Amino acid sequence: DQRVCLRFRVKNGIKCSEAFKMLKKAFDDDTMSHPRVYEWF
């Protein structure tokens, strides 16, 4: 689940833009939208 991945990255001090790139690499076309990632971040 992408939310779990985001929480992990936030707790490890990874910036939102970097977290989005990692999600994009892992989930490709199924990645949540960039604005949604910022919303959750």
Image: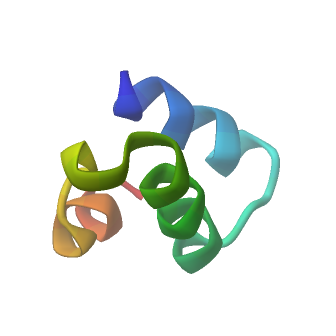
Q: Is residue 6 left or right of residue 31?
A: right
Tell me the residue at 26%/72% (across/down): 34
Q: Quadrant of the C terminus?
A: bottom left
Q: Residue at x 53, y 55 (%)?
A: 25
How far across and down, in percent of the image, does residue 16 sit?
54, 71
- Position of residue 13 relative to residue 26, above or below, is below
Relative horizontal placement of residue 6, taking residue 28 as reference (left or right): right
Total number of numbered discs in the rendering = 0
Decide: is 11 above or below 40. above
- In the displayed orientation, state which residue is furthest to the right: 12
* Residue 18 horizontal/vertical position (percent): 64, 72
Q: Residue at x 21, y 44 (%)?
A: 30
Q: Quadrant of residue 27?
A: top left
Height in image: 37 above or below 34?
Answer: above
Where is residue 15? Give x, y as percent: 66, 72
26 vs 24, left or right, is right
Which quadrant of the rendered structure holds the N terminus? top left
Residue 26 horizontal/vertical position (percent): 51, 43
Q: How is the image coloured?
A: rainbow
On the rendered structure, is 29 left or right of 18?
left
Residue at 67% x, 46% y is: 9
